[in-house]
């Protein structure tokens, strides 16, 4: 949720929090209480209370008197603290659900040692410690189930707060904002001239909600601003794991890694470099056309681009410790992102996507990285058909959505599932373009010789028997038969 904090920043924050007239629901003062169980409960309570009070962070502070807010120092050292033989921070993280971003800081104020625990706000679900949820009511910590009105209010907030509105870095100076964000890339991608004055730059970033003015002065960098235009995603602790990883393997398994790289830039400013890097790793094939030898990539560049965009835009940012990934094998490419899709994988091609990150998707469309809503998977399927590749797979594994592109295989090396999936997606593509799967279109899809009608008929029969496709008109003559995907039957019945 934050960049690394300087001692100057932490000292200023400490003095500011000590000026509060009393403890709040998002700030708790301690002197030297080091009970791990109680610290864990406070983590839950403060994270939930920060969300309830509209704060990006909550704080647990050691070395300050509770009543007077006078800095007196502490004997508690988080870095040395343990629970059993396990470091305190590791133990706390293991028992928190869902995982949230928190960080201990130890520093000196007025020659007195103090410690500060910065706790990121809860998102999507109340934070639990050892299976129990806590909340702060005034200065009192109590189980959330004992405050049903607060619990209902908290769930309403979760339903209304998108990831993009969260704060990635808080109370940054103007200089720090311009140091952390690649603002020249923003103006270049938006086809806008770069303002001469700093104020003009900051106003433009504010207008697109990449930054927002902080309550206590300075600027907050939003998750939207950081994830799209960070110079280094690693500068934002909560987003470091959201950088795209690209891994090249030897062979068809994950046993031997040839090369691995994790992106550093924000998605928008680093997108072109990411696609160029992936395409540089993709193997090429040599084909002969009209007596000329030509090198072509194993996978269509447009298909790669669309699937990478989808992985970035449709991921669930609230799945902790996971990010989008491209894995390149000898015979396939797998592009995955954390989070289960909001529509069935069977309906990716015909259903307009439901984005859990609408502000992110909208800005990516405005700068031309993704195009018309709902056309991405259509393009992927069209490209694989055009180059007569096996049909892609769209699947869910645990909390991960994955798309798989396959290297070229002749029809006689495709298994039954490959053939049925190809016919199904072909029927989907035809149907959304107001057409139908036919014997002729199947021959074109698989590169079957025009006179080999029987081979295409066998493929269609397999798909019909698998109930992946259905005849459009059962009474039509065999040569005039047309087919639709299974889900289109309901549309046909309603006409």
Image: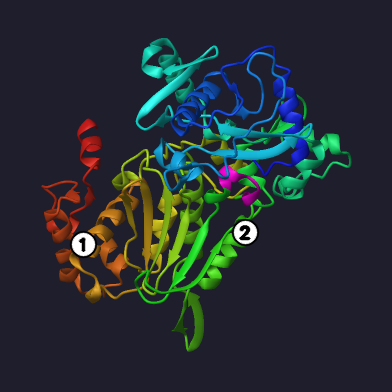
Res 272 label:
2
- The secondary structure that most of the magenta stretch takes on is helix
At horizontal 40% and vertical 18% (from top left) the residue drawn is 144
Q: Is residue 79 above or below residue 448?
A: above
Q: Is residue 274 left or right of residue 350?
A: right
Quarter of the image for the N terminus: give it: top right
The residue lying furthest to the front in this view is 75
Picture quadrant of residue 250: bottom left
Residue at (60, 39) in percent of width and height: 77
**Residue 430: image location, x then y, percent:** 33, 52
Q: From mark 1 to mark 2, how far is it between C-alphas?
A: 35 Å
Question: Around disc 1, counting alpha carbons within 10 Å, would you say few (fewer than 14), some (14 to 19), or many (20 or more)?
Answer: few
128 and 433: which one is in front?
Answer: 128
Range of residues picked out in magenta: 233-239
For the residue pair 176 and 77, the one nearer the viewer reads as 77
* Label 2 secondary element: helix
Residue 411: x %, y % from top left: 25, 73
In the displayed structure, would residue 159 be above or below residue 445?
above
Tag 1 residue:
417
Q: Is residue 396 magenta?
A: no
């Amino acid at each position: 949720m934050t960049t690394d904090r300087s001692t100057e920043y932490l000292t200023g924050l400490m003095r500011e929090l000590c000026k509060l007239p009393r403890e709040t629901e998002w700030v708790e003062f301690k002197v030297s209480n080091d009970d791990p169980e109680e610290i864990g409960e406070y983590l839950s309570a403060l994270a939930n209370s920060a969300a309830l009070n509209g704060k990006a962070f909550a704080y647990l502070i050691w070395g300050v008197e509770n009543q007077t807010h006078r800095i007196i120092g502490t004997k508690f050292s988080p870095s040395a603290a343990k629970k059993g033989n396990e470091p305190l921070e590791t133990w706390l993280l293991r028992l928190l659900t869902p995982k949230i971003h928190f960080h201990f800081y130890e520093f000196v104020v007025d020659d007195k040692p103090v410690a500060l625990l910065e706790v990121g706000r809860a998102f999507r679900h109340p934070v639990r410690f050892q299976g129990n949820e806590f909340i702060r009511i005034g200065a009192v910590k109590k189980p959330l189930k004992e405050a049903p009105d607060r619990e209902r209010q908290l769930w309403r907030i979760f339903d209304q707060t998108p990831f993009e509105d969260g704060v990635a870095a808080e109370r940054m100076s103007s200089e720090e904002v311009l140091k952390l964000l690649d603002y020249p890339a923003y103006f270049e991608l938006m086809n806008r001239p770069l303002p001469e004055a700093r104020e003009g730059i900051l106003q433009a970033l504010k207008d697109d909600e990449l930054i927002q003015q902080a309550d206590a002065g300075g600027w907050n960098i939003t998750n939207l601003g950081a994830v799209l235009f960070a110079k280094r995603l690693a500068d934002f602790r909560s987003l470091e794991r959201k950088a795209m990883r690209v891994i090249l393997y030897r062979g068809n398994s994950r046993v031997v890694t040839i090369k691995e790289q994790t992106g550093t830039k924000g998605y928008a400013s680093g997108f072109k470099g990411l696609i160029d890097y992936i395409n540089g790793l993709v193997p090429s094939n040599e084909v002969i056309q009209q007596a000329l030898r030509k090198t072509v990539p194993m996978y269509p560049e447009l298909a790669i681009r669309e699937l990478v965009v989808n992985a970035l835009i449709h991921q669930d940012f609230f799945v902790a410790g996971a990010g989008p990934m491209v894995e390149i094998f000898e015979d396939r490419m797998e592009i995955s992102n954390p989070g289960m899709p909001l529509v069935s994988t069977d309906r990716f091609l015909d259903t307009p996507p439901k984005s859990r990150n609408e502000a992110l998707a909208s800005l990516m469309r405005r700068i031309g990285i993704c195009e018309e809503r709902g056309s991405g998977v259509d393009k992927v399927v069209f490209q694989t058909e055009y180059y007569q590749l096996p049909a892609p797979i769209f699947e869910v594994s645990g909390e991960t959505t994955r798309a798989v592109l396959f290297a070229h295989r002749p029809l006689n090396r495709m298994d039954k599932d490959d053939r049925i999936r190809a016919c199904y997606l072909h029927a989907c593509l035809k149907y959304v373009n107001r057409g139908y799967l036919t014997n002729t279109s199947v021959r074109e899809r698989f590169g079957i010789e025009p006179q080999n009608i029987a081979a295409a008929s066998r493929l269609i029969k397999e798909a019909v028997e698998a109930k992946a496709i259905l005849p459009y008109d059962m009474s039509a003559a065999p040569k005039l038969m047309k087919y639709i995907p299974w889900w289109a039957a309901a549309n046909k019945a309603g006409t």
